[in-house]
């Protein structure tokens, strides 16, 4: 039978939308990052690398860059640790297992903006739930102004995001655990392998695909963090919780669009430089395992 | 320790952790029934006097219904757009192959990782004279969500035998009918997954409309929350009531469709 001639034009609507509304903004963004485009001025002038030169002189950018890396690294690690732990717990024959699975996943379907507002109240230094609880159990020396103390603000945001996404990782790992044959684990426990070595040598290698997916999604998602930080601290106190997207927001709000575009381009470069190689590397590694 | 008692201990730990998830929700629920003074204390105790007026104040706002309507309209149309166009292109990418389409596929995969450049997007919408319209925000969301949908659908399309196409075409069926009558019904389960991901992403998103929609009559419900908090942050009881009204429909739907929603939101990642 001769080769079927599938019509190419079937793919055109998707390509057109992607080209026009995803790729084109990135390309014109490169141009506008070299201009003094401002909301308060009519004319747009080409100013070469000025925006970037200005940016690299700013301590804010450096801070946003460092904080985004710290946030992404911490969230990626902690999200996976809590995700695996929860999955291992729920993989046992618990009575309330289905209910618990539903509860742990619940924050993931709520808008991050709303979660941010809820936690602003939870972390209130005077009478927020966290400090009230610490006071109640006699740990009042641990009470902090969680969001306004530069020492704790970023950490607090990280914990809040873990609260939001741990259930997602849990479900992905739970699904991965289903693929591990029960008798494999049973035979190893008869051989006398303890829980930890069973986990390390049998369960964990078989979880590799779930692990790959979780790491990649956590990294990419956390580098693009915005709402939670905006609502909880707006990047403050000082610039101690500034991340790329809050920096873009403040430069955007002040009307310096060319400048905001330059930050946007740096974020694009940063995520591509980290994300694309990780995607390639993890795809390769998974095949070998 | 016997196996039984260690299971019970584990269950207690798990329930304690689940309480950590539930307490914040409980906190806004009880405080949404408190007066202006008491709600500002963010406590977990029941209200001394139940203030149902908070909810009356919320429903007096006409922007809340408008917000729901906008969220519904925008996520609904984005679902149609993404499902249809992603399925059509995934069908051709997987079946036809070739240098051009492989390149397109690779571009979509890159689109899964890199962020969309939002500030230049504002400029683009301006130049196209569609800034702030429903159309522009739907196109923005479609562009952001197409990569994921194409990726998922191409993977699934492989499992549909080519012989099916050949048989249908031999019978004199055209490509349009082949796609709409035979292929689409076969991928309907994946389309449900795509729809769930699209609805959850669009419904909960703040980022897109914050930058792209300036006209407050077109704001989605999440943008209304933002606006409402800015206006009413002196009366937390009313703010919490507003949030309860916003998240309740989502939680009710989640409660009823949890299996599909959890599977849908994570299935996308499994194929990776």
Image (spheres, helix red, strand yellow):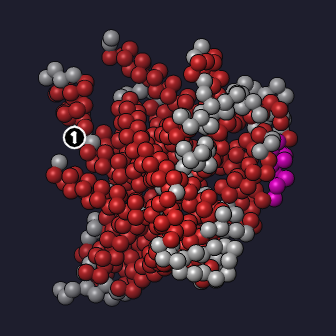
In what element is the residue under mark 1? helix
Q: Is residue B96 above or below residue A133?
A: below
Q: Residue at x 67, y 81 (%)?
A: A42
The residue where tag 1 is placed is: A205
Q: Is residue A223 above or below residue B43?
A: below
Front-most of residues B189 and A16: A16
* Residue A134 placement (x, y as % from top left): 60, 21
Q: Residue at x 68, y 77 (%)?
A: A41
Toward which corner of the image does residue B185 lie, by quadrant?
bottom left
* Residue B205 placement (x, y as % from top left): 58, 57
Determine the residue located farthest toward the left in the rendered image. A191
Q: Quadrant of the N terminus of chain A?
A: bottom left
Front-most of residues B251 and B104: B104
Question: Is residue B81 at least partly visible in the picture?
Answer: no
- Residue A166 located left or right of residue B255: left
Toward which corner of the image does residue A120 lie, by quadrant?
top right
Question: Mark 1 falls within which chain?
Answer: A
């Amino acid at each position: 039978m001769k080769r079927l001639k599938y019509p190419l034009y079937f793919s055109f609507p998707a390509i057109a939308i992607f080209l026009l509304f995803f790729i084109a903004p990135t390309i014109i963004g490169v141009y506008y990052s070299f201009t003094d485009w401002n909301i308060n001025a009519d004319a747009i002038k080409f100013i070469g690398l000025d925006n970037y030169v200005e940016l690299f002189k700013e301590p804010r950018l450096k801070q946003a860059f460092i904080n985004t890396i710290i946030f992404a690294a911490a969230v990626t690690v902690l999200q996976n640790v809590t995700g695996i732990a929860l999955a291992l717990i729920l993989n046992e024959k618990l009575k309330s297992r289905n209910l618990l699975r539903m509860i742990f996943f619940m924050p993931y379907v709520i808008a991050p903006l709303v979660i941010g507002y809820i936690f602003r109240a939870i972390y209130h230094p005077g009478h927020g739930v966290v400090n009230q609880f610490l006071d109640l159990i006699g740990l009042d020396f641990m009470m902090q102004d969680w969001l306004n103390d530069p020492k704790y603000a970023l950490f607090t945001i990280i914990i809040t995001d873990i609260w939001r996404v741990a259930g997602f990782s849990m479900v992905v790992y739970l699904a991965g655990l289903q693929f591990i044959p029960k008798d494999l684990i049973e035979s190893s426990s008869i051989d006398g392998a303890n829980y930890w070595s069973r986990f390390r040598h049998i369960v964990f290698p078989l979880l590799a695909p779930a692990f790959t997916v979780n790491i990649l999604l956590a990294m990419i998602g956390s580098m693009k963090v915005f709402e939670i930080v905006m609502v909880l601290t707006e990047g403050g106190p000082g610039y101690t919780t500034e991340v790329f997207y809050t920096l873009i927001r403040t430069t955007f709000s002040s009307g310096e669009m060319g400048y905001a575009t330059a930050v946007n381009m740096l974020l694009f470069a940063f995520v591509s430089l980290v994300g694309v190689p990780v995607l390639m590397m993890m795809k390769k590694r998974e095949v070998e395992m | 320790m016997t196996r039984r008692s260690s299971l019970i201990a584990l269950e207690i730990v798990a329930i304690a952790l689940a309480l950590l998830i539930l307490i914040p929700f409980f906190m806004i629920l009880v405080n949404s029934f408190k007066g202006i003074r008491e709600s500002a204390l963010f406590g977990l105790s029941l209200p001394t006097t139940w203030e149902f007026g908070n909810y009356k104040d919320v429903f007096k706002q006409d922007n809340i219904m408008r917000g729901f309507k906008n969220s519904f309209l925008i996520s609904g149309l984005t679902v149609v757009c993404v499902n249809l166009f992603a399925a059509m292109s995934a069908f051709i990418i997987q079946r036809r192959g070739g240098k051009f389409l492989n390149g397109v596929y690779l571009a979509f995969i890159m689109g899964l990782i890199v962020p969309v450049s939002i500030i230049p997007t504002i400029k683009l919408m301006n130049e196209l004279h569609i800034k702030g319209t429903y159309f522009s925000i739907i196109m923005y969301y479609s562009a952001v969500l197409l990569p994921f949908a194409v990726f998922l659908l191409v993977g699934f399309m492989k499992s549909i035998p080519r012989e099916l196409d050949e048989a249908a075409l031999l019978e004199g069926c055209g490509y349009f009918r082949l796609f709409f009558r035979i292929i689409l019904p076969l991928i309907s389960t994946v389309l449900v997954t795509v729809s769930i991901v699209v609805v959850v992403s669009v419904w909960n998103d703040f980022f897109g409309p914050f930058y792209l929609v300036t006209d407050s009559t077109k704001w989605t419900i999440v943008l209304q929350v933002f606006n409402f908090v800015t206006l009413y942050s002196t009366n937390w009881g009313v703010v919490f009531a507003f949030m309860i009204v916003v998240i309740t429909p989502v939680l009710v739907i989640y409660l009823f469709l949890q299996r599909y929603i959890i599977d849908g939101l994570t299935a996308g990642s499994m194929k990776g």
